[in-house]
Amino acid sequence: MDSAVARERALDAAEELFYGRGIQSVGMDDIRGASGVSLKRLYQLFPAKEQLVEAYLERRDGRWRGRLAEFVELRSAPEERILAVFDWLEEWFGEEGFRGCAWINSYGELGATSDRVAAQVRAHKRAFGDYLASLVAAAGRPAALAGPLFLLAEGAMVTAGITRSTRPAAQAREAARTLLEPH
């Protein structure tokens, strides 16, 4: 198996196991077993588990933000695009195996001990906040709305992860709609 295939298999296994069980409860031997990649090859690709965690978060970030943007871009009205973020969150929260936000979970497990993981989490959250700010700007709304919308989305993610309910997305959407109403 060439390095590119081994890397993808390892990342696929890491994503499933880290997200499903938590990073600290998964060892490199678990990744080996789920991926079919030998431990020797795993450590050649990722000399430390922290590097595998970073690669997992980086790849997941691209996929997550891509799926979100694809969903949002289906809406034509700029304000509907803002609200579509919350519609997408509701769909995501309803997916089988949803276990909350991978970045919040990772930060909770490793943020205090791994500067590299904390940096990945911060980069993801900054990119998501910037995306919301771009939607607010495209709608011609005050830039100051982006922060509260970001907090609504983040709060919905945390609450949905804990309660295993899609309802927080609908509640956050309603609050976002209220923020967008002319005053």
Image: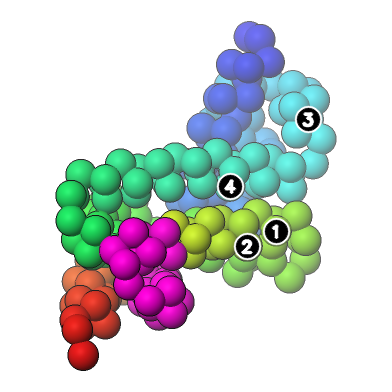
**Amino acid type of the residue tagged 4 in the rendering:** Leu
What is the span of residues highlighted in magenta in the rendered image?
133-159
- Look at the magenta stretch and give its main secondary structure: helix
Label located before the other in sequence (3 or 4) = 3
Mark 1 Cα-neighbour bin, 10 Å: few <14, some 14–19, many ≥20: some
Whole-percent x and y of residue 51? Answer: 74, 42
Which numbered disc covers residue 179?
A: none
Residue placed most toward the observer, 71 or 144:
144
Q: For the residue labelled by badge 1, is the local secondary structure a helix, a strand or a loop? A: helix
Whole-percent x and y of residue 12? Answer: 51, 32
Residue placed most toward the observer, 47 or 35:
47
Q: Are marks 1 and 2 in contact (CB under 8 Å)?
A: yes
Which numbered disc covers residue 57?
A: 4
Q: Are marks 2 and 3 in contact (CB under 8 Å)?
A: no
Quadrant in the picture for the N terminus: top right
Whole-percent x and y of residue 123? Answer: 62, 57
| Residue behind mark 2 | 122
Which numbered disc covers residue 119?
A: 1
- Taking the spot 26% from the left edge, 82% from the top edge, the residue there is 179
Q: Nearer the viewer, mark 3 or mark 4?
A: 4
Label located before the other in sequence (2 or 3) = 3
Mark 3 Cα-neighbour bin, 10 Å: few <14, some 14–19, many ≥20: some
Label located before the other in sequence (1 or 4) = 4
